[in-house]
Image (cartoon, rainbow, N blue to C red):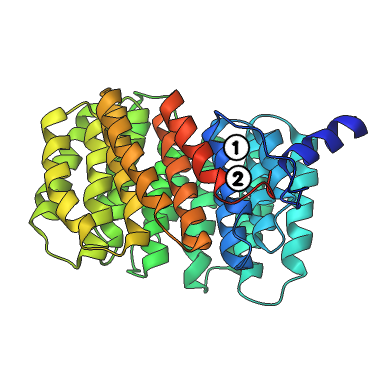
Amino acid sequence: MTVVVLAVLAATSCARRSPRRAAPATDDPLEAGWRFACAITNDADDRAACQERIALAYLDRGDSERALVLGEQIENWRRGVVLAEAAAKLAEGGQTNAARARAAEAEAIGRGIQDWQRDRILARAAKSAVFLGQEAEVGRRSAFYRSNPEYRGELAAYQALTLARRGAWTNALAVLDGLADSTHLDVSSWRANGYLLLAKAEPPGSAQTREALAQAWAASARVPGTKRWDVRLGLVEEAVALNEAASARSWLEEVSTNLLAAAPPAYIHAPLVAQLAVRWGLLREAERVAACERAAEPLIRQLQAIEQPALFALLGEAWARLGDTQKGLTYYEHAMALAGQLTNPRPRAMAGVDICLSLERARLRHRPVSEGLNRLLAGFGATHG
């Protein structure tokens, strides 16, 4: 076992390698994304943030082992967040001993920090307690954070999920209804996401799933500012995953009407319209994707060069999700070309991470894309694996 672990660590480490040994090419966008994250050598915070995103994407893929191997290499507090999220995944999958061990590690990291990151980790660590059936512990933490607007909503969502999992549906809804008095960004966002957690805990197509989704959508109306659109676009995607495409389509019509008629600054508007295109792609609405494409492109071109690759990748993701692989590839190749033109290694690597995460969400594997990613990685030398 020790030999295996050491081999995995050697294959994924950010440690410097001999300049004579080039890292092998990869066809896996997340493996490439990790290498891009490791290539950020002049900003430890950005490096850790990108590494966290890749590790969490492995969790979303269902590869908890890989996520943990990578998460252990993160050199700041974000390692605790990855461990906490992994603990929840392990607990949900029935691996209770491993979940408890990882949750304890996350807790230890959190309690060793005195700044705001402490609460980020400790709040997130409560999620594993939900799936471990530790209702009293979840309730205790929810009470502890009740006066903290940054985490009140998140812990209430976990408490509601705990109640729903043991069949106390009415009580679960009441916990989230109790947040209706707040328009704080974090509280209102987590209230909507709390109803979503309840929906995902029930069988798709059930009356309770539909009720919780409807509550989530209604609650999202109270999320302030442009964050409301982010929350609502997320709800659309989850509704599709729960086989509620009719609701998703109706909701997306509403978002489209409001979002395409809006005129916020391009740096706010462009990402939202690109995300709107992705959701229409998910619903296989080619004309809608094309309309978003026409609206997004001029907005994206108004942005700084470092912001453009990620957004053109989103347009590629929209077409790929719709099923038009060739058009998706065109946008991904354009995104990689723009990233390659960035002279500063840090934004170039961060653009690479964004492109890789988009490819993972699109489930797109294609040789020209892999070759493009490997060419981008080669530009950082052979020092990162």
Q: Amino acid at mark 2?
A: Trp
**Which type of secondary structure does the marked residue at label 2 adopt?**
helix
Q: Secondary structure at mark 1?
A: helix
Looking at the rendering, in which quadrant would you find the C terminus?
Answer: top right
Contact? badges 2 and 1 (CB < 8 Å) = yes
Q: Residue 333 lies in what quarter of the image?
A: top left
As rendered, which of 152 and 374 lies closer to the eye? Answer: 374
Q: CA distance from mark 2 to mark 1?
A: 5 Å
Q: Position of residue 370 (x, y in %)?
A: 48, 31
The residue drawn where x is 47% and y is 56% is 348
Q: Which residue is mark 2?
A: 34
Would you call the spot at circle 2 few (<14 residues within 10 Å), some (14-19), or many (20 or more)? many
Q: Quadrant of residue 302?
A: bottom left
Viewer-closest of 37 and 162: 37
Tell whether 163 sits left or right of 211: right
Given the image, on which type of amino acid does mark 1 rest? Answer: Glu
State whether residue 369 is above or below residue 86.
above
Rendering coords of residue 210 (x, y %): 31, 33
Q: Residue drawn at (26%, 38%), measured in percent from left and top?
A: 279
Residue 285 seen from this side: yes
Decide if residue 364 is in sight here: no
Instruction: Say whether residue 291 is left or right of residue 68.
Output: left
Q: Is residue 303 above or below residue 312?
A: below
Q: Residue 55's image quarter? A: top right
Q: Dot 1 surroundings within 10 Å: few (below 14), some, or many (20 or more)?
A: some
Q: Which residue is pictured at 61% across the width and 48% down the height?
A: 127
Left or right position of 99 against 31 = right
Residue bearing mark 1: 31
